[in-house]
Image: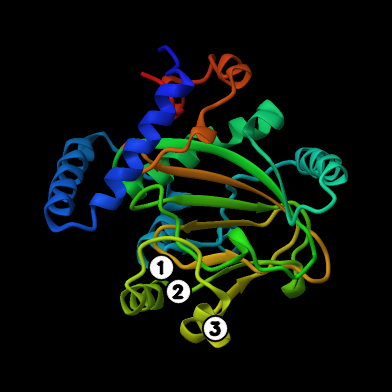
Amino acid sequence: MAAVPAPVLALTSLLAKARRWSLYLPAPRAWHAAGRARRIERHRLDLPIEDPTAAVGLAALRQAGFWRPDADGADMLKLSPDERADLVRRLDALKGQEATTTTIQSNSDQMSLAIYAAGLDTRLLALVERYVQTPVLYLGAAAKCERADGVAVNQRRWHTDMEDLQVVRFIVYLSPVEESDGPFEYLPAERTTEVRSSLRYRSGFLSEALADRHIPATERVGVTGEEGAVIVFDGARLFHRARPPTDRDRYSVTYSYTSRWPLELRATALPHPRLRQALAGLPHHALACLPGRV
């Protein structure tokens, strides 16, 4: 399969953004819902066999949009200590070059093949596919260091993800994360629905004043964890953020997925040619999850 040129992907992203905004109109919304229902029905008999060890995770995602695999004894996305240390070293090197940046990020083309390929694990893809009920698109991995500066900007502000109707993300902590270290924080699904409705929210980051009024501290769920802890959530379904760390820098890596027909596909999701070539030996089902392929 040939790679789609980056300019074509950029144009596709622009058209997808226009399509996403059009879904706030009744007719396009109904048309999109009908198309999605047809894709789900066509794919129903092709869904992967459910992994018994991930069944509890699938149920949790369907019910609450959130799951802690380690809390249920599930072995999923367990990066080795060496792999985690390698990511931290790469982030520290970038941190030295970006002294004033609040969030230091290393994208897929800046990490090892093994770490990127971990997101194409068969069991992991099967879990996501059964959740979204259609073929899956792998948006890649992003390693991040959140500086302990207490500043609430960008992903540290409350938001929902807008790439698709379901955006499944796996976060792996690369260092221990306590309450003051910037844990992942979310608002439960039922309350997210209520707040989204009351604000007539479509997309974007909430201001701190607006978040304080509508997302009180008593309802916010902070997810602490040891190094290697894994968090799974649907970012389109939950208001969430990275709580601004104040004590220690937070190190993590996030793997992201949508359906194969996302509402918006960003050019940064296109795998680097080096990665694409190195992954050529993977099963067809995994390669089909890479964006920018026809």
Of callouts 1 and 3, the N-terminal one = 1
| Whole-percent x, y for residue 94 in the image | 81, 41
Q: Give the residue at x 46% y 58%.
A: 235
The amino acid on which the numbered mark 2 sits, given as a three-letter code, is Pro
Camera sees residue 265: yes
Q: Secondary structure at mark 2?
A: loop
Asked which quadrant contains residue 86, the reply is: top right
Furthest residue to the right? 96
Judge from the rendering whether residue 122 lies leftward or rightward of residue 189; answer left or right. Answer: right
Answer above or below: position of 69 versus 75.
Answer: below
Asked which quadrant contains residue 147, the reply is: bottom right
- Tell me whether the residue at label 2 lies in contact with that at label 3, contact meaning CB atoms closer than 8 angstroms: no
Query: Residue tagged by mark 1?
Result: 64
- Neighbour class for label 2 at 10 Å: few (<14), some, many (≥20)? some
Query: Residue tagged by mark 3?
Result: 212
Q: Give the residue at x 44% y 66%.
A: 238
Instruction: Work out how far the residue at label 1 is from the one at label 2, CA to CA, in angstroms.
Output: 7 Å
| Whole-percent x, y for residue 61 in the image | 41, 60
Q: Nearer the viewer, residue 226 or 196?
A: 196
